[in-house]
Image (cartoon, grey):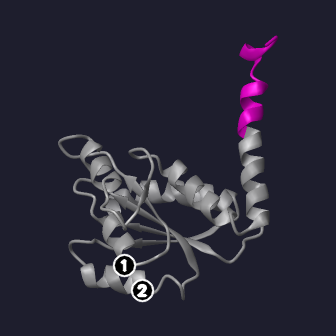
Amino acid sequence: MAETSGTRVGIVMGSRSDMAAADKAVVVLTELGVESEVRVISAHRAPALLTRYAESVAERRIGVLIAIAGLAAHLPGVLAAQTTVPVVGLPMPGGVMDGLDALLSVVQMPKGVPVATVGVGNAENAALLAAQILAVGDPQLAERFAARRAAAARQILDDPANEGL
């Protein structure tokens, strides 16, 4: 594993049912040498706990938050409203619209409370975006991020189907 910078990503989900997505994000962050922590805190069932968590991000060395939410998907917005740390919303599939409702809830934040949003269920992109945000102030992480991108490009370039192009 690469050396960590000390700044972490906080991953918050409203329900344990989203743990598989959190695990996927942790894998990507670990590969990039970014520490993370995972919490289950419902914006609806435990709002006071969510407020305490949001108020503690600076002392916890959290530089970016990933908020995983489905259905009404209020968690990313509620979290973003309570901290100045960037929030990446990860809408999850499910419900009557299979995640479209969650996507729209996360992406349609009111002015002044931005939440970056990735595709429905795309935990890997949520982790990559969080790492990319942290990399702005961390040259070593920026190098690791660039190396990951270059490796992905090499896989395509080295594919025998692309020979002769």
Instruction: Identify the residue at horizontal 78%, vertical 48% (top origin).
Output: 147
Q: Position of residue 112 (x, y in %)?
A: 37, 67
Magenta highlight on residue 38: no
Label 2 neighbour load within 10 Å: few <14, some 14-19, many 20+: some
Quick check: 122 above or below 42? above
State the residue position of label 2: 55
State the separation of the CA atoms marked 2 and 1: 7 Å
**Location of residue 76 (image quadrant):** bottom left
Say if mark 2 contacts mark 1, CB within 8 Å.
yes
Q: Which residues are magenta?
A: 152-165
Q: Quick one: label 2 or label 1, which is nearer the N terminus?
A: 2
Whether residue 14 is visible:
no
- Circle 1 sits in a helix, a strand or a loop, which is it? loop
Q: Amino acid at mark 2?
A: Glu
Q: How many marks?
A: 2
Q: Amino acid at mark 1?
A: Gln
